[in-house]
Image (cartoon, rainbow, N blue to C red):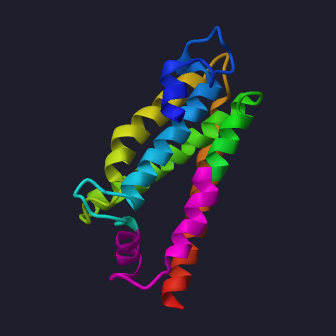
Amino acid sequence: AILVLLFCTNFLKSNQNAVKWKDPEWLAWLCTAAYLIHNLEEYGVDIFGNLYAFPDCFQSIMAGSAAAMPDAFFMAINIPAFWVTFPLIAVYSKKHPWASPVLAAGLFTNAVSHTIPFLVGVGYTPGAFTAIVLFYPISIWAGVALFGKGKLPYRWMAVCIMVFLVGYAVLLGSAKLYISG
C-alpha cells in the first residue's frame, strides 16, 4: 500500500509543488517502505529461498554458532523499531523535515552492517541484497536531496548516523550479553 501511495499518488508529499524525489516526507515514506521490504528478506524469504534466515545468521555471527535466542528477541526489536517507529517518524516528517534524514541514516547504517560481513569473508547475510540494492541508493540520494546550502546542515547528518550507531551498539551489546549469559 505504501508503494502505491508513493509512486501512484502525491498523498505522501509534504509539498505538493515539489518533486517527489526531493520532498522530505516522501523520502521518509520511501525509507519506510524500503525497510519493510528489507525485513521481508531478513525474516521472510532470503535470496536463496531460506525462510526466517536472519536470526540464525545473526546468532551464528555473534556467538560463533547458532545460539538459542528466542524469536521474541527479534520481534521485540523489529516490530517497534521498524514497523511502528519508522512510519511514525515518516508522519512526523510532514511538519518537521529534519526527521526524514533520521530514517535515511537508519538505512545507511544498516547497509554498512550488511556490507561488513562481505568485507571480512563471512559473505551474504539475509537482508544484504536489499541493503545494497535499496538502502545505499536511497540513503545517498536522501543525503543529496536534504543536505547542503539552503537545506539541512551537514552536522545533522552526523547526528542522525550517530543515533543509529548508538542504537546498533546497544542492540549488539544486549545480544552478546544474552548469548554469553
Based on the displayed image, in which of its 4 quarters is residue 132 positioned?
A: top left
| 121 left or right, relative to 43 | left
Number of numbered callouts drawn: 0
Residue 63 part of the magenta-drawn span: yes
Residue name at image x 66 percent, y 12 percent: 16
**Furthest residue to the front?**
1
Q: Main secondary structure of the magenta part?
A: helix
| 100 left or right, relative to 57 | right
Where residue 144 appears, as percent x and y from the top left, is 52, 25
Q: Is residue 84 above or below residue 12?
A: below
Based on the displayed image, in which of its 4 quarters is residue 88 positioned?
A: top right
Residue name at image x 54 percent, y 91 percent: 181
Where residue 166 appears, as percent x and y from the top left, is 62, 60
Q: Is residue 12 above or below residue 101?
A: above
Would residue 103 be visible to someone looking at this image? yes
Residue name at image x 61 percent, y 21 percent: 23
* Part of the protein shown in magenta: 55-83
Would residue 158 be visible to someone looking at this image? no
Where residue 98 appears, as percent x and y from the top left, is 70, 32
**Furthest residue to the right?**
95
Where residue 53 appears, as percent x and y from the top left, is 34, 66
Residue name at image x 52 percent, y 35 percent: 1
Asked whether 93 or 49 is in front, the reply is 49
Residue 180 part of the magenta-drawn span: no
**Furthest residue to the top?**
17
Asked whether 113 or 150 is in front, the reply is 113
